[in-house]
Image: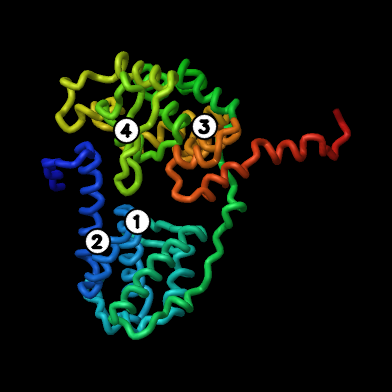
Amino acid sequence: MAERKRIRVHNKSDKPDNVIIKENRIIEKCQEIEDELPKFLRSYFIYLKGNVLPMTRLAYLRDIRFFCYYLINETSLTEAEEIKDIKLEEFNKIKASDVNLFIDYCRRYKVESKNKVSIFENDNRSLARKKSSLSVLFKHLYREELVDKNITDAFNPIRVPKPGEREIKALQDDEVMRMLDAVTHGTNLTKKEYEFWRKTKYRDKAILILFLTYGLRISELQQLNLSSFNFNRGEFIIYRKRGKESVMPLNRTVTNAVRAYIEQERPKSDELDEEHKDALFLSLQGRRMTERQIRQMVKKYTSIGLSTSRDAGYSPHKLRATAATSLIGRGNSIYDVQALLDHENVTTTQLYAAHKKNVKRDLIKNFEWDEDE
């Protein structure tokens, strides 16, 4: 397998190099998919590049590539054998009913290889995203006069839960304390987990405290650097969606946790490869932790807080929900919490305000059918 080329960054922006490199990798993935798709979609590629976030652009391109794969392998709508060979005339013959059949196909499908059969299943939220990807594509092709009709009005509606219907999954205060006790003292860990904990306990605690205090997105935490923190000024910098720089205040708990990790556990920067010298959270191999490694670590400790199996542990996004519900539950303004969590719309923050801790438990607490004590 070819070795990844080393990237040299000539950075004249205020963003740290690791943020620039990550953005570049997303752009490279987009370009790789664009090279696989038909050439007549070039103006659509330009539209996405200028109008949506890089990760949204990547998701849309993946959806379009899969739709083209479906046209070739599951329909008679094209004579092409390769995605890039699909013709504009064939796209122009696609009807809304064909797209509706594709969305239905996406609910549950299988992919066979030599040694295995993989079954994929999508919920309504995922299907709605695929429908949105195709809607944007066909509306663009119609505006550019590449197809004769705007077929999107006849796409079948897909019901997704309304904001108020969505179940908010977050840790309760006692579960948070149980989780923090595990990461502080190594309680309820397996023998193998305990051996790792002895080497990473300060790092893991700092990560959990940052998630719980600020409701950071996993990408925001993963990109943190040593240079992100100014302890003298009591603040640190994160990079939000659309590359927005945001200055976050430090409190005593966060300061103590991050400093303990830096001073007592993190390798010295001069011992690290150039690419990882400034990275805050490092793996045991001395490299910047990946989002997957952070996710696995969070799942482990949240499962202890929840007193459940490791597989049933929560994702970092659930710690974001925990931060939101805890802040609102302590009487903080919804608008202040909205600003802290970087929600574009306050209605998103209101979801957490509507979430009442233990509401179901309280409803049935004294509603027993069995008279036995």
Numbered circle sitting on residue 196: none
The CA distance from mark 4 to mark 1 is 24 Å
| Crowd around label 4: few <14 · some 14–19 · many ≥20 (10 Å) | some
> What amino acid is at disc 2?
Ile
Q: Which residue is mark 4?
A: 237
Q: Earlier in the sequence, mark 2 or mark 4?
A: 2
Along the horizontal axis of the image, is 364 left or right of 240? right
**What residue is shown with label 2?**
33
Q: Kindly identify the amino acid type of the residue bearing the numbered disc 1.
A: Thr
Q: Secondary structure at mark 3?
A: helix
Note whether residue 30 is visible: yes
Please name which of the two marks, 3 or 4, marks the residue nearer to the observer. 4
Q: Could you tell whether 123 is left or right of 62 in the image?
A: right
What's the residue type where badge 4 is placed?
Ile
Q: Which residue is mark 1?
A: 56
In terms of sequence position, does the residue under pointer 1 or pointer 3 come before the other? 1
Q: Which residue was labeled with disc 3?
A: 303
Which numbered disc flags the more N-terminal residue, 3 or 2?
2
Mark 3 crowd level (few <14, some 14–19, many ≥20, 10 Å Cα): many
